[in-house]
Amino acid sequence: MYPISQPYSDFLQKRSRTWLLKADINGAEYGKDKIVSLDIENSLSPYDDFTIGAAVISKMIIKIRAPDAIAENARIVPYLSLSLASMRWDEAVYPWEDADFTWLGGGLDWLPLGEFFIDKRERVNNVWVYTCYDKLTFANAPYISSLTYPATQQAVWDEICTRLGYTYDSSVQINPSYMIPVAPTGYSYRQVMGYIAGANSASVFVGKDGTIKFRRFSAAETPAFKMGLSDYIRLKQTNPQRTFTRIVVTYNKEDDLKVEAGAGDESQTLSFENPFVTQEIVNDLLANLNGFSYVPVEIDARGYPQIDVGDRIEYGQQEGYKWNEANMPWEEADFPWDGITYHQTVALRINYGFKGGLRMGITAPSQSFQQSEFAVKGPLSSQIDMLNQTTVKQGRNYFGVTITKEEGLIVERDDHASKVILNSDEFTFWIGDERALWFDPWEQQYKFTGTIEASRFVGGTIAIGSGNDVFKADLNGIWLGNSDFANAPFRVDMSGHMVATDGQFSGTITASTINGGTINGTDINGGVITGSWIRTSENYPFSEMNVAGNYFAVMLSSSLYAKISENIVGSPGVVLSDGVTTGTLFTQSLLGPTTVLASTTDIDLFLSNGSNKINVPSWSQLYSRGDGRTIQQELNALATLISLLNSVDSSLQSQINNLSARVTSLENA
């Protein structure tokens, strides 16, 4: 039952009630002045009997007086409240701090009646009539799970709610040990939700607040609402009280396979379908439901919007004498003092209607059972039952195999990843939505879009393409480009020889290793080429990698060349020839960071352009191994000598000048 405040509960008991109505439609509020009427149908009984595992979609028809239509699939949440206009301040019996309403009237808190979405509409004069359903309608899509099976029922439930954007509350209690062994193929989201609820002794519905809820049934449950004689207008008992002591669950309808627990006759048996149950689950259901009972009734009552579908209701009924009407001894009076006897039922269906006031109808349906104790099937019934169990039926699933009038024999995986269709016109293997292998009766050909893997082919010919654009293989070998092996531009014979008819192969050979022979072509792509003589041209000039001499060479002619060889006087080197003189540069020492190049002949350095220069980083880096000195050191020594000579020259000049002065002096004397 939806929780309401104490003032709301008290005002619902008043004989004179003034209702307030509004609706939230995609965020816009429509009041009582625009809402003409409202009818809501809630149900946990898709059939005329009690069951568990139901997931029935609630329906609402709302009539709105408005010039413009509401948007498609709009979300509508109707609300009810009670007016406080008739209450005086001195009539309030609530503590001051709990009086959550104004003294001058107004209304109580707004109680939602559910969350609905527009499905279809009709305009009658100036009134729009909208037929709406709750969010379980979005669960009517095929469920294809992404889980790995076996999976827990809780995991499947969470996957469904996540995909559909559903929020569920604490009423959803799923046994963590309950498993689903294989993917539930061929069912809708709503069916799977109902099966999971049924395995847990519950049914599914959308609450007034828009959340997904379980109504979990139990023999030990207590009434959620007590209804007196003045709370209903009409009450009719439609069948005797039902009490369940036996449970029978069909887990394979096609083969009529069932599992059961408990004992009792047909009227005491709860029967339903659920492909997810096991004997353990049915035993748990019996332990929970053994002794569960209700009285099948139809009740027209005053409106109590807080009652949820599935609530247990206790109602009073005048069935005996009142104490002042009894004319029998005290000890024989086996009836209440007021003559009112109370019974319990379950609100399996609730209809709310609002048109100025609120009316409510409650139904607890029940199947009528045969009263005779001699329930014997006749010959015709027995034969029909036998045919139902043994006949292959159209559209019936036999472990993934079905027969349909449109496609014939179909074999399909549970996850729809692949299927096979067989009939007089079609022989097709499907991978998802793509054909993988099929027979074309008009061309008399089998066609395949995938990869063929086989240990061997015995006899025959494999051919792809036609005319001069063909690939063929048989006991002669493999060939391309012509249906005739001998004339094919390219072929591989049974001895392993690869032959190009005109001596040319224009394709690309890609391999990790190619050994021996001569390869002529533009591009060679691969890993390792071993033992090959590679030359850029047959005639001079060319570059080559010579396997016989183990060298790389650039050859202008037989006498003009540059070669890099792996062994010159014990070290790799470079041989240069100008047609007259042959010089060799080779590595003399690799012990230090500098590699010294030496030559057995003179080395000439010259520039073809006189304006260019030969540059070195520093004169200190030109070194004479024989003298152990650099050019920089020699230049420094030369500069010192020149400076010394300049000094000697200055001293000598001074002495000459002195001598000249003396001679002059002597001459004058």
Image (cartoon, grey):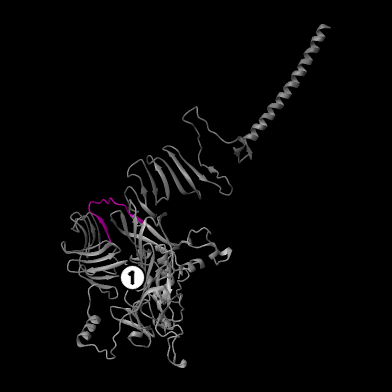
Quadrant the C terminus occupies: top right
| Residue 121 x/y as whole percent | 30, 58
Q: Kindly give the residue lying farthest to the right in the view shown.
A: 669
Residue at position x 79%, y 12% in the image: 661
Above or below residue 220? Residue 145 is above
| Residue 166 x/y as whole percent | 42, 64
Residue type highlighted by circle 1: Thr
Q: Which residues are magenta?
A: 495-513
| Residue 563 x/y as whole percent | 43, 44
Q: Nearer the viewer, residue 379 or 588?
A: 379
The image shows a total of numbered marks equal to 1
Q: Residues within 10 Å of mark 1 (few under 14, many from 20)?
A: some
| Residue 3 x/y as whole percent | 48, 68
Residue at position x 29%, y 91% in the image: 373
Above or below residue 298? Residue 166 is above
Kindly identify which residue carries mark 1. 185
Q: Kindly give the residue lying farthest to the top in the view shown.
A: 668
To which quarter of the image does residue 414 belong? bottom left
Circle 1 sits in a helix, a strand or a loop, which is it?
loop
The answer to whether 447 appears left or right of 550 in the picture is left
To which quarter of the image does residue 76 belong? bottom left
Q: Nearer the viewer, residue 625 or 24?
A: 24
To which quarter of the image does residue 555 belong? top left
Majority secondary structure of the magenta segment?
loop
Quadrant the N terminus occupies: bottom left
Residue 502 inside the magenta-drawn segment: yes
Q: Nearer the viewer, residue 333 or 496?
A: 333
